[in-house]
Image: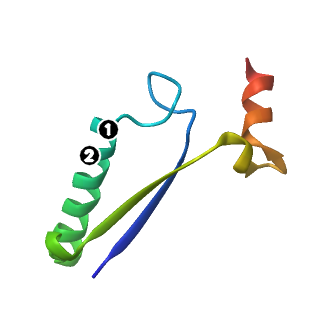
């Protein structure tokens, strides 16, 4: 029973708010298909969870992503 957790910042996507419903569906289908193909897992018992994290709650290079993005603008 695979469990996959995808975490993304809310800044992505064409609207700047995170992945669209359609993009999330594509991620879920793609990850499920990959686990079926590579590991022989059953789709009915494969769980994919997508968490959208506010940029101020995501850090890299010792800084919040919101700060990094603001500096790049």
Q: Position of residue 9 (x, y in %)?
A: 57, 43
Quick check: marks 1 and 2 in contact, CB under 8 Å? yes
- Figure quadrant of the C terminus: top right
Which element is circle 2 on? helix
- Figure quadrant of the N terminus: bottom left
Relative side of 68 to 21, left or right: right
Tell me: residue 33, above or below residue 27.
below
Residue at the far top in the pictured view? 73
Q: Position of residue 8 (x, y in %)?
A: 52, 47
> What residue is drawn where x is 15% and y is 72%?
44
Q: Nearer the viewer, residue 37 or 43?
A: 43
Number of numbered discs: 2
Where residue 66 sits, quadrant-wise, is top right
Which element is circle 1 on? helix
> What residue is drawn where x is 26% and y is 46%?
25
Tell me: residue 32, above or below residue 25.
below
> What residue is drawn where x is 27% and y is 36%?
22
Where residue 13 sits, quadrant-wise, is top left
Q: Position of residue 67 (x, y in %)?
A: 80, 34
Tell me: residue 23, above or below residue 58.
above
Q: CA distance from mark 1 to mark 2?
A: 6 Å
Please rate how many residues cluster around mark 1, counting C-alpha atoms within 10 Å: few if below 14, some from 14 to 19, many from 20. Answer: few
Q: Which residue is mark 2?
A: 25
Q: Position of residue 70 (x, y in %)?
A: 77, 25
Q: Which residue is mark 1?
A: 21
> What residue is drawn where x is 19% and y is 60%?
33
Relative side of 64 to 51, left or right: right
């Amino acid at each position: 029973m695979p469990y996959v957790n995808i975490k993304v910042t809310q800044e992505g996507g064409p609207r700047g708010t995170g992945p669209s419903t359609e993009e999330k569906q594509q991620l879920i289908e793609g990850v499920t298909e990959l686990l079926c193909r590579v590991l022989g897992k059953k789709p009915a018992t494969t769980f994919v969870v997508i968490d959208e994290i506010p940029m101020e709650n995501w850090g890299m290079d010792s800084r919040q992503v919101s700060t990094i993005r603001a500096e790049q603008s």
